[in-house]
């Protein structure tokens, strides 16, 4: 086993263990920290795939932005979970595991079938995903999708602001909804 | 050089773990994290195939996916916060106001 494959196996093992940790943790905070580990390991894998720019973006956007946002919300609302104490329909877990194994089998089957005759050709991508190459592609061939994504982010920002706004008392509809939901 | 199929198999396994998490867990926040994990595993597939074919389009696409994921997280978490104004729990079995 060559050194790069050994490194891949180590990183992949950590990332898989973190993925399992996200699913089985009792505390949502632990899940979020396992998720952070998973994202960091994926950033390492991006570096081994010659996508340096995406590795940096992964750390900044996912680890720095999304996980911190999720942690804030956990502190705000989701500190406890009753997944393990509340009575559940007994068949859901077994069914979910069965479906997951089915999905995994299908994915692995298709990957194994399609990818045997395709050896990687690293010579074509010597530059890799350095910021210059990705930036040139983004601002020339993909300028329209780039602008659309910028607009999408603006819309999401406004939507999050409106959704997160505290309900005003002079809005009769909101007051009615509040009364209705607390009355039940 | 690590073969591309190794990366694809890893991303498939992570995707399946995330899907099982979405099906098993009842806490809306943890379901959210599992969805993020599934998005990330597909990103890994795109980057691996981008190297395989010597083409940068896959990496540009991953950049777009990351932007959409960030927007999705902001709106989704705002929805959860708005929901907790009306009811205490974030157990998805109890969030059924819009369920037919």
Image (cartoon, coloured by chain):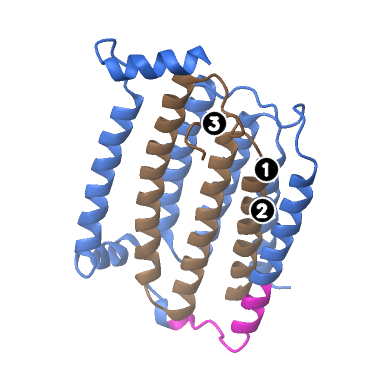
Chain colours: A blue, B brown
Q: Is label 3 in a helix, a strand or a loop?
A: loop
Q: Which residue is mark 2?
A: B17
For the point 19% across and 68% down, the residue is A140
Q: Position of residue A121 (x, y in %)?
A: 49, 83
In the image, residue B21 sits, relative to residue B7, either above or below, namely above
Residue at mark 2 shares a chain with residue at mark 1: no
Which chain is indicated by disc 1?
A: A
Q: Which residues are magenta?
A: A108-123
Label 1 environment density (alpha carbons within 10 Å; few <14, some 14–19, many ≥20): many
Task: Return the residue at label 1.
Answer: A23
Q: Mark 3 packing: few (<14 Cα in 10 Å), some, or many (20+)?
A: some
Name the residue located 76 percent from the left edge and 58 percent from the top edge: A98
Badge nearest the viewer, 3 or 2:
3
Residue B24 point in image, percent of width and height: 69, 44
> Is A42 rendered above or below residue B22?
below
Query: How far is the residue under mark 2 from the one under mark 1?
Result: 8 Å
Chain to which mark 2 belongs: B
Q: Is residue A148 above or below residue A75?
A: below
> What secondary structure is found at the residue carrying circle 2?
helix
Q: Is residue B80 found left or right of A24 in the rendered image? A: left
């Amino acid at each position: 086993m060559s050194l790069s494959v050994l490194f891949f196996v180590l990183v992949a093992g950590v990332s898989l263990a973190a993925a399992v940790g996200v699913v089985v943790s009792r505390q949502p905070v632990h899940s979020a920290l396992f998720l952070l580990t998973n994202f960091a390991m994926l950033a390492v894998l991006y570096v081994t795939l010659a996508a340096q720019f995406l590795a940096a973006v992964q750390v900044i956007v996912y680890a720095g932005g999304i996980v911190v946002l999720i942690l804030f919300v956990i502190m705000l609302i989701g500190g406890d979970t009753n997944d393990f104490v509340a009575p559940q329909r007994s068949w859901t877990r077994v069914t979910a595991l069965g479906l997951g194994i089915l999905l995994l089998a299908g994915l692995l089957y298709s990957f194994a079938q399609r990818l045997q005759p395709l050896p990687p050709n690293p010579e074509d991508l010597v530059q890799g995903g350095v910021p210059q190459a990705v930036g040139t592609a983004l601002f020339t061939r993909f300028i329209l999708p780039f602008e659309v994504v910028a607009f999408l982010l603006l819309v999401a920002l406004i939507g999050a602001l409106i959704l997160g706004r505290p309900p005003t008392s002079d809005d009769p509809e909101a007051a009615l909804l509040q009364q209705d939901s607390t009355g039940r | 050089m690590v073969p591309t199929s190794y990366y694809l198999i890893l991303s498939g396994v992570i995707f399946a773990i995330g899907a099982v998490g979405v099906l098993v867990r009842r806490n809306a926040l943890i379901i959210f994290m599992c969805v993020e994990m599934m998005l990330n595993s597909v990103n890994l597939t795109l980057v691996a195939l981008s190297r395989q074919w010597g083409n940068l389009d896959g990496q540009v696409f991953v950049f777009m996916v990351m932007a959409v994921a960030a927007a999705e997280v902001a709106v989704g978490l705002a929805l959860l916060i708005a929901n907790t104004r009306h009811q205490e729990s974030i157990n998805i079995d109890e969030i059924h106001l819009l369920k037919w």
